[in-house]
Image (tube, helix red, strand yellow):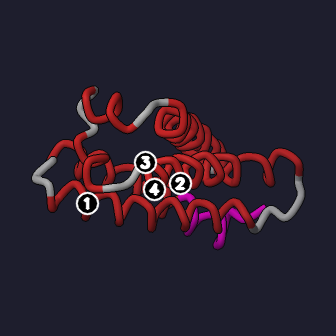
Amino acid sequence: MNIVLWVITVLLTLLFLMAGAMKIAQPKAKLAASGQGWVEDFSEGTVKQIGAVEILGALGLILPAVLNIATVLVPAAASGLFFLMIGAAITHARRGEVPNVVINIVLGILAAGVALARFGPYSF
């Protein structure tokens, strides 16, 4: 089970790093043009902040465990990403972006699973 948790954690880390970097590196107009229409509902600064939160959450999933420092931050980061995905799912649902809602739900479930397992029986 620990190997499965590590695989899920690495997958989530890579996905959130890429998503966060995209939000920070690209201007809002380019994100909107590439199919991320939800950015129209938020300011440029808010989009960048969401990207920063995703990157920090991704780093929080992996670095504490790898460095064996404050490992309680791993499930805390997973919990934070779960709540971020709830907000994202609500935003996409309001806009009728069903495929994005499905992605948010899947990522949220994976993050919640990591949080529950690492807070519980598979803690470090």
The kind of secondary structure element at disc 1 is: helix
Tell which circle, 1 or 4, labels the residue nearer the N-terminal end: 4
Element under label 3? helix
Q: Give the Cα separation between the discs numbered 3 and 1.
A: 16 Å
Give the number of the disc on residue 36.
none
Mark 1 vs mark 4: in front:
4
Mark 2: secondary structure: helix
User: Disc 3 vs disc 1: which is toward the camera?
Assistant: 3
**As displayed, is residue 22 above or below residue 101?**
above
Asked if the residue under mark 2 is in contact with the one under mark 3, i.e. CB atoms within 8 Å, the reply is: no
Q: Is residue 119 magenta?
A: yes
Q: Quadrant of residue 84?
A: bottom left
Residue type beneath disc 1: Thr
Marker count (numbered): 4
Q: Which label is found at residue 91?
A: 1
Q: What crowding class fits label 2: few (fewer than 14 Cα within 10 Å), some (14-19), or many (20 or more)?
A: some
Q: Is residue 23 left or right of residue 70?
A: left
**Callout 1 crowding tier (Cα within 10 Å): few <14, some 14–19, many ≥20:** some
Residue ID for mark 3: 44
Q: CA distance from mark 3 to mark 4?
A: 6 Å
Do the residues under discs 4 and 2 have CB atoms within 8 angstroms?
yes
Depth order, front residue of 51/102: 51
Which residue is tagged 4?
46
Does residue 117 belong to the magenta stretch? yes
Where residue 12 sits in the image (x, y, percent)? Answer: 53, 43
The residue range painted magenta reads 114-124
* Residue holding disc 2: 49
Q: Are marks 3 and 1 in contact (CB under 8 Å)?
A: no
**Disc 4 residue crowd, few under 14, some 14–19, many 20+, Cα 10 Å:** few
Where does residue 4 sit, x and y in percent of width and height?
57, 44
